[in-house]
Image (spheres, grey):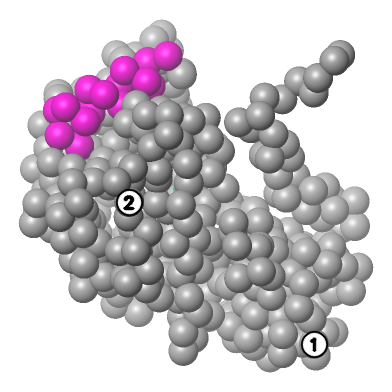
Amino acid sequence: MTRPPLNRRLAEFGTTIFAEMSALAAESGAINLGQGFPDTDGPEEIREAAVRALRDGRGNQYPPGPGVPELRTAIADHQRERYGLAYDPDTEVLVTAGATEAIAASLLALVEPGDEVIALEPYYDSYAACVAMAGGTRVPVTLRPHEGSYVLDLDELRAAVTDRTRLILLNTPHNPTGTVLTRAELTAVAELAVERDLLVVTDEVYEHLVFDGAEHVPIASLPGMRERTVTISSAGKTFSFTGWKVGWITASPELTSAVRSAKQFLTYVSAGPFQYAVAEALRLPDAYFDGLRAGLAAKRDLLAEGLARAGFGVYRPSGTYFVTTDIRPLGATDGFAFCRSLPERAGVVAIPNAVFYDHRDAGAPFVRFAFCKKTEVLEEAVSRLKRLA
Ligand SMILES: *Cc1c(COP(=O)(O)O)cnc(C)c1O
């Protein structure tokens, strides 16, 4: 071969740290707190709903391109009942293969080669790759650690907007920092988007995983935003079925139709029987969502307190599956080296936050641990991490 097979757009995304760290976990027997998936399945009745759909022959053949009507209606009802956002299930809702496809289809549909896309850094790994596949240029705006949490510098965000900026790619609750953007921060982002005529694509897959009374505010609910926002969510995190890959967008008819144009040539459709099950899941009573939050908040406390006792600086998350730590109190500065040695030193796997940064230096001393694991697994991890102290 005269040239490497992977094209230039994707060359920098060859392999992910998750593969490397999961392999390390497997070969060393370390507890894997790297990747963010629950080690317990979601509600039994929802699993049974999927079995029923499969047995009844619902969704075993190509479902409708936009998603099955039952699910689109359930998504529209969810947005209206939870957030007061009215979307027409026929023209303003699109079911996707997880939030991952929703992100890819949105960027492929909305970004012109040469357009700039602003993303909050540290960012979810697929954002950079999807911006690249769309031929766009990513412009990171760094969330800064401040008094135990991460904050958005609104002046920095404003300064990042140029004449070529097409959209702002938001994520709240935010992976990996656990930050939940406040209504005031989101209002400022919204005002900027209106003023500079930008689109907003917002990844809200952790919308139900907020703790300590923090409020999740969909930016689409703020003045002037409904018409310029693509809101993305997914069943994976909310219902602990990350393997089902049922996601969705809600947006104006024009934006939905644009995203559908890209989506139809990616997967066309997916997850037929699971769509029916997720339609039922979205109608679970509040007790389910409250229980999910309370259970995860307790796991967060267990892991965050254990990490603090082991000597880490801890950024206590207000949402998501993750806690970000500072390794400098342990005398380390390089998160990569730290994570590569952690399985041997303490029998635990974590992810260096630097992989989520363009400004790698800004992320160097930070390391992410997932707490969406069984209590006994977290207890064992905490006990092993004591060796570091
Ligand atoms: C897990 C995750 C996703 C992917 O969601 P799927 O529905 O599994 O595709 C997207 N964005 C963020 C921030 C995530 O953490």
Residue 123 at x, y percent in the picture: 51, 55
Q: Which residues are magenta?
A: 251-265
The x and y percentages for residue 31 are 77, 62
What x and y, as percent, mark residue 52? 39, 25
Report the disc number at residue 162.
2
Residue 114 coordinates in the image, percent (x, y): 43, 34
Check residue 249 in the rendering and tell me which mark sits there, or answer none.
none
Q: Quadrant of the C terminus?
A: bottom right
Vertical order, 309 against 133 (above or below) = below
Q: Which residue is at the front of the view, 134 or 172?
A: 134
Q: Nearer the viewer, residue 224 or 326?
A: 224
Quick check: 5 left or right of 296? Answer: right
Residue 381, placed above or below residue 42: below
Tell me the amino acid under the disc marked 1.
Answer: Gly
- State how far apart marks 1 and 2 are (Cα): 40 Å
Q: Which residue is mark 1?
A: 331
Residue name at image x 61 percent, y 70 percent: 362
Q: Can residue 35 be seen at all in this image of the molecule?
A: yes
